[in-house]
Image (spheres, rainbow, N blue to C red):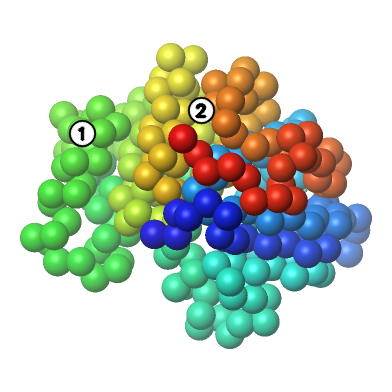
Amino acid sequence: MTGKAESEIVHFDNVGLRYDHDREVLSDLSFTLFGGTFYFLTGASGAGKTSLLRLLYLAQRPSRGVVRMFGKDAITMPRSGLPALRRRIGVVFQDFRLVPHLSAFDNVALPLRVAGFSERDIAGPVGDILEWVGLADRKTAFPAALSGGEQQRIAIARAVIARPDMLVADEPTGNVDPDMGLKLIRLFELLNRQGTTIVVATHDMQLLRKVPSALIMRLDKGRLSDPTGALRYPPRTPA
Ligand SMILES: Nc1ncnc2c1ncn2[C@@H]1O[C@H](COP(=O)(O)OP(=O)(O)OP(=O)(O)O)[C@@H](O)[C@H]1O
């Protein structure tokens, strides 16, 4: 796991994104994300948060600029190299994207199965993580039978089961009540303390105050500002 603070995880240089021949939805993004750091990405609806996250988890290529992930140039590298980079990134989607015909257990186990782990090596970690998100008793339930908050927690468990170097989460508290939202943020903090770089997109300003050590990136009409001033420098090591 690349958890060492001050190590570069992601570097963007002059990145722009346009979806069609129209305007750019992201412009002139230049920043570095450091290992073991907790970031919030804020901005109004339509500011470009989801688009920036899609660039971060390599689901989208930018229209211009340089994207370096874990020290590798993600733009010029052959497509065949991308899956290995993607496996280092856990993603919590805004709409969860659980596989409907798989149980909660099997949804969480999916990344380990894809990575070729044997069933013997899957049961323990999946059981532990279901316990960790408080859903050990729901492991046989299918997504349709789970509440929004339960689906959210299964999505988080699936995103972290393979111990990614970076976790990217799009509005992960959007579908849960404030108590559960706080609990989820505490889970992210715990992961962060174990060395995972966390990037959480949210428009919930209350949430930002819950993690005082987090660095804040703000998007405004596709342009990034950096109110904490720390993006350009190796941040302090998280406690
Ligand atoms: N696939 C797409 N094709 C064309 N335009 C898109 C596409 N996805 C997003 N956009 C546009 O890009 C801009 C940024 O959208 P994005 O979803 O990244 O913003 P956001 O900050 O995540 O918004 P929200 O908080 O409402 O989810 C918007 O103007 C949106 O309409």
Q: How many marks?
A: 2
Query: Is residue 127 placed above or below 80 in the rendered structure?
Result: above
Q: Secondary structure at mark 1?
A: helix
Report the residue at 59% width, 61% height from top: 8
Query: Is residue 170 placed above or below 205 in the rendered structure?
Result: below
Report the residue at 80% width, 55% height from top: 29
Q: Position of residue 233 (x, y in %)?
A: 70, 50
Report the residue at 55% width, 67% height from top: 70
Query: Is residue 171 placed above or below 222 in the rendered structure?
Result: above
Nearest the viewer among 44 and 98 is: 44
Residue type, mark 1 in image = Glu
Q: Residues within 10 Å of mark 1 (few under 14, many from 20)?
A: some
Residue 223 seen in render: yes
- Mark 1 = which residue? 131
Quadrant that contains the N terminus: bottom left
Residue type, mark 2 in image = Thr
Q: Position of residue 174 (x, y in %)?
A: 54, 27
- Mark 2 = which residue? 173
Disc 1: residue Cβ within 8 A of ligand 1's nearest atom: no
Nearest the viewer among 200 and 140 is: 200
